Image (cartoon, rainbow, N blue to C red):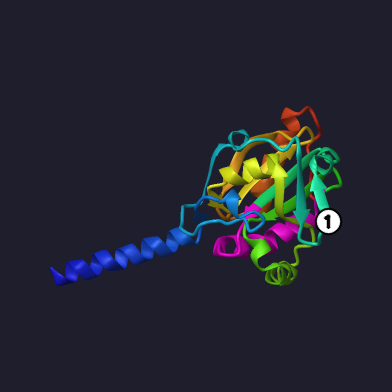
């Protein structure tokens, strides 16, 4: 019986470790704005659920880490916007950030990547340093209102990545969990969205 208990305990540890490597779960708390929060926990790596179920981004104003303002007009300026929701407490989110940064740098001008750090307002200096270390140079949003907060309230797992068209619609499926091949997964999602919108597919710049 003792050996069996040890085996069960060891199996539980292994399963927990493998799940944690994929992503973190938990809701957000808009009442804490601008200190948006994401809970800890874990889920497996998967892509699940229609992104549109999270809401839309047709009318909002958000504050970026550098103090600038990001609105629906910035969404309208691009054919597609890739938004990555993450948190400082999510290991898989941080681990995939260098891949996200590299992907963002080779996109053509009609597609952009932005991130939303759900708890970044709690320690902006640490957030900025972390992004610098991972070489992410794009926009990172910390807080906001309108449709932005509605979408944030519906985020249950980090990282969650969605594609947004120029009209502010969240299209396709939400991509949840750390992706083994982020570039391939995100490019396929963007090109599907572009095709559905009647626009030309893109390729990554060399």
On the question of residue 188 being in view, the answer is no
Q: Is residue 155 left or right of residue 137?
A: left
Q: Farthest residue in the front direction?
A: 31
Image quadrant in which you'd find residue 53 = top right
Q: Position of residue 118 (x, y in %)?
A: 63, 56
On the question of residue 120 being in view, the answer is yes
User: Which quadrant is the N terminus positioned in?
Assistant: bottom left
Instruction: Tell me the residue at 82%/51% (across/down).
Output: 69
Q: Position of residue 189 (x, y in %)?
A: 67, 41
Question: Please, is residue 126 above or below residue 155 in the view?
Answer: below
Image quadrant in which you'd find residue 99 = bottom right
Q: Is residue 53 left or right of residue 42?
A: right
**Does 34 appear in magenta?**
no
Task: Tell me the residue that label 1 is attached to.
Answer: 68
**Does 90 appear in magenta?**
yes
Q: Position of residue 170 (x, y in %)?
A: 68, 36
Which residues make up the magenta segment?
A: 85-107
Instruction: Tell me the residue at 75%/35% (across/down).
Output: 58
């Amino acid at each position: 019986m003792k050996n069996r208990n040890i085996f069960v305990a060891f199996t539980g540890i292994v399963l927990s470790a493998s799940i944690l490597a994929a992503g973190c779960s938990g809701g957000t708390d808009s009442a804490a704005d601008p200190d948006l929060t994401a809970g800890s926990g874990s889920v497996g790596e998967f892509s699940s659920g229609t992104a549109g179920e999270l809401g839309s981004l047709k009318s909002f104003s958000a504050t970026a880490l550098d103090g600038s303002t990001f609105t629906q007009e910035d969404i309208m300026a691009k054919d597609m916007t890739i938004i990555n929701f993450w948190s400082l407490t999510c290991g898989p989110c941080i681990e995939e950030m260098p891949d996200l940064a590299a992907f963002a740098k080779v996109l053509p001008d009609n597609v952009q990547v932005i991130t939303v750090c759900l708890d970044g307002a709690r320690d902006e200096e640490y957030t900025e340093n972390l992004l610098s270390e991972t070489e992410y140079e794009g926009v990172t949003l910390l807080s906001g209102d309108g449709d932005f907060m509605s979408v944030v309230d519906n985020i249950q797992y980090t990282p969650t990545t969605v594609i947004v068209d120029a009209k502010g619609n969240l299209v396709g499926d939400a991509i949840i969990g750390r992706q083994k091949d982020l570039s391939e997964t995100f490019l396929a999602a963007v090109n599907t969205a572009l095709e559905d919108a009647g626009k030309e597919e893109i390729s990554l710049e060399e």
